[in-house]
Image (cartoon, helix red, strand yellow):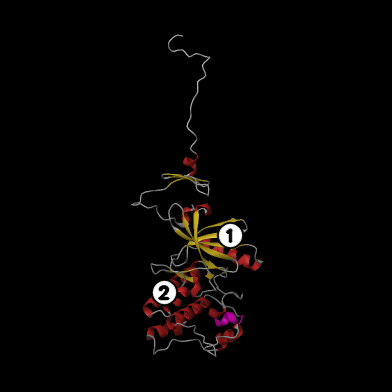
Amino acid sequence: MKKGCLNPNVTLKLSLPPPDEVSFAKFLTQSGTFKDGDLLVNRDGVRVVSQTESEPPPPITPSDNQLSLADMDMVKVIGKGSSGIVQLVQHKWTSQFFALKVIRMNIEESSRKAIAQELKINQSSQCPYVVMSYQSFYENGAISIILEYMDGGSLADFLKSVKTIPEPYLAAICKQVLRGLLYLHHQKHIIHRDLKPSNLLVNHRGEVKITDFGVSAIMQSTSGQANSFVGTYNYMSPERISGGKYGYKSDIWSLGLILLECATGQFPFSPPELDEGWTNVYELMEAIVDHPPPSASPDQFSPEFCSFISAW
């Protein structure tokens, strides 16, 4: 046989290494995302994610439109309601935390309309004093809303731990809530209608933001009046309870009750028997309509605070 020729009768045996099944699986997450180094590929496309600790990835903003439910790791449940839950979730690639509100749609029509209302308001609101909404999804009979995470919880939670809030801190809270209401009332023509301590969220930076627009009313004209009866009875204005027309001032009434409750540590409308509480909601509603508006005691608070409360 000449040099350089192959014998056709000889069978060439090649020994290949066994396939490394782990090598690919270790890059593939349960959500179907492929990640290798700074390369990230999933059903939403290709992205490059920084891996250096000195240069963390920039936080995701609502305008980025790059969030996916598959890229969220559930941390814990932080809230429950009759129609759904709120979860604390963390984005896999940026480690950013969000609040994920999951609402089951097997509820009555009025509730579905309230949810639709909330989605419309969330998607159109861009204000530093209103909780930001990032994206919304519909999947498996539920609507999921990715919201800004406020790590301090609600003002109601904070009030339970501190009992009362001093005037200088109340001034800072009030300033932020008023700016949020100014935006909602005059730029979006929205009456919140359910302003209460549990719908004001705080974070570690001391920021206070308005949330939960499930019962908000969008005003179709600049007259700013509505006559529907929804919201929390405790913080309703007298004109709403009596069934009359109401406007943006009804939210200011609610804010006044909130500030007075934070200052004194108790709800401003006291029941006849303090130890027993209100026997039914009708007694409370009657007290709000018929009794004089609550006021701040000049023996306990500054003239400025007393004047501010009496002006609402």
x and y percentages locating residue 151 in the rendered image: 44, 66
What residue did someone put label 1 on? Answer: 143
Residue 225, relative to residue 141: is it above or below?
below
Question: Outermost residue, top direction?
Answer: 2
Q: Is residue 301 left or right of residue 134?
A: left
Q: Which residue was labeled with disc 2? A: 173
| Residue 14 shown in magenta | no
**Neighbour class for label 1 at 10 Å: few (<14), some, many (≥20)?**
some
Residue farthest to the left, as pictured: 54
Tell me the amino acid under the disc marked 1: Ile
Name which residue lies at 50% across and 73% down: 198
Q: Secondary structure at mark 2?
A: helix
Point out residue 115 in the picture as x, y percentages from the top left corner: 59, 65
How far across and how far down the image is residue 27, in percent? 47, 44
Q: Position of residue 132 (x, y in %)?
A: 47, 62
Label at residue 237: none
Label 2, label 1: how far apart the Cα atoms are: 31 Å
**Range drawn in magenta:** 236-243
